[in-house]
Image (tube, rainbow, N blue to C red):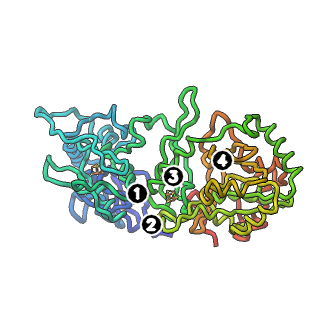
Amino acid sequence: MAEMIKLFVNGNEVEVEAGKNLIDAIGAVGIEIPHLCYHPALGADGNCRMCLVGLEEGGPPLVAACKTPAAEGMKVLLDADHIKKIQHDVLEFQLINHPVDCPVCDQAGECSLQDYYMTYDGQKSRMTVPQVTKSKKMDFGCGVIHDQERCVLCGRCVRFCRQITKTGELGIVNRTDTARVAIFPGRPLDNRYAVNVVDLCPVGAMTSADFRFKQRVWFMKKERGVCHGCSKGCNITIDHNREKDQDDLIYRFRPLFNEQINGYFICDEGRLSYRDENENRLTEARLSKTTMSLDKAVTAGLKEIKRAEGIVILISPDCSLEQMVSVKSLAEELGATLSGFSDGYIKKGDGDDYLIQDDKAANRAGLAALNIDSSQTGFEEALAKAGLLINFNNDLSLFYDESSLKKLFKEKRVIGVTSRNTKLFQMANLVIPVASFTEYSGSIISCDNILQTFNRAITKNDTLVDICEVASLFGGPLKTDRDRYDELKKIVVSLNDFDPDTIPATGLKLT
Ligand code: SF4
Ligand code: SF4
Ligand code: FES
């Protein structure tokens, strides 16, 4: 439990956490101190002066809130006339050469400069001399486009590359009104977290080549999610919008703060993995080359199961715990061998010592917790003796090349239950489309043994069923969420108290 102290803001007593600077301490009780250069992940730089506040008694009359620790009995002034005048003047200074091209700026709607102008400034420009012009649309590499005219020189992007990625590609060159953020000649951004500078930039000076001009931010709905790009389980915001007569589309993943998992950032690969949720999706069931309804496909699947001599069920290490336990119960019901073989998901040496993991599976820890065998020999030996393989979304093509797959599947019947229309699943005799992870609710365990839950964020026009439902339609005994939670508790000791409603949004560290 953090130590609490009492101080006064505009004469009103508030209780805040000790050890934090004034921006964070007072911000936590809902009182905003405007700031541009400070960011909690990067620390205070003190260059923008937007956060100046008054102190009554003891200490200098004016301090930078980002550099001032909250102290017992402190009397902070935010609404005094001289503070309002400072905020007004700092904003006027920031806007002297700013292009104010908000109507065509991607940041409009989530821009600190725009918001602060409306809240603390509102004056008309008094400038009668021509504005200083700088470069626009500069390709900084890694999908980051820089607009020098919009930049307020807060230095967050520069500090990110120095302090977080330690790659130091960015710097501020020149002085006064010729100062600008730049890369070294011929040395663009070159790190796997570069697009975080777009989120960090308090204005629209850093934009994402991927997102630019695609959507106005106020049209998008924002849902919490968990990235499935690797076993780290970084928290994300899923920004999506359903335009008239169109499917619900995701426009971007952005990092969502979670102190015990990813802090304020995510990797660029995970960020762009939203595309897989939109593209190359399977939406119709198919028997050989004939499309059909889900009901007919399930009937066809049940016939395959009935006449099969020996069944192997393969499950993806990306599946949720609820899906894994449903498929495990189905396998027991059918007397089938269950495998979680997924060595292809591991890219040895690809991970780093920050967020990115070698293991690109979101829930391998779930496979282990449910005692699902994931060995190659276990899978291959069982498949050699079986007549039917039911593959629940496991991308075997990450491990086997096309000719090995053909050999493996020779004389086998294959049912693919999948969210992707990939070559692998085009080889199956019967395919059933299912929801992907932004379209169902579930729980996963990260590589750090943190249990996280997530909710359905996206609803497609063609509503897709969850793997849990397909397992149940194929004869699995777990019919409801409650059945699945109860079964999970029975199998996994550390999930004894498991109830998705009681898991904190930040996750639960399992013992
Ligand atoms: S580009 Fe953005 S983050 Fe970088 S210094 Fe300019 S305003 Fe700050
Ligand atoms: S580190 Fe892994 S979980 Fe995090 S954003 Fe990247 S791919 Fe996603
Ligand atoms: S936020 Fe304090 S000086 Fe910039």
List the residue tagged with mark 1.
Answer: 193
**Separation (CA) of disc 4 from disc 3:** 15 Å
Instruction: Confirm or deny contact between disc 1 and disc 4 (CB under 8 A).
Output: no
Mark 4 vs mark 3: which is more N-terminal?
A: 3
Residue 243 place in picture, x, y as percent: 53, 30
Q: Nearer the viewer, mark 1 or mark 4?
A: 1
Q: Is residue 139 above or below residue 508?
A: above
Mark 2, secondary structure of its residue = loop
Mark 3 vs mark 2: which is more N-terminal?
A: 3
Q: Residue furthest left?
A: 129
Mark 2 vs mark 1: which is more N-terminal?
A: 1
The response on whether ligand 2 sits within 8 Å of label 3 is yes
- Name the kind of residue labelled 1 in the image: Tyr
Tag of residue 330: none
Q: Is residue 402 left or right of residue 313?
A: left
| Closer to the camera in the image, 230 or 89 | 230
Residue 297 place in picture, x, y as percent: 79, 40
The response on whether ligand 2 sits within 8 Å of label 2 is no
Tag of residue 354: 2
List the residue tagged with mark 4.
Answer: 440
Q: Label 2 crowding class (10 Å Cα cut-off): few <14, some 14-19, many 20+?
A: few
**Separation (CA) of disc 4 from disc 2:** 28 Å
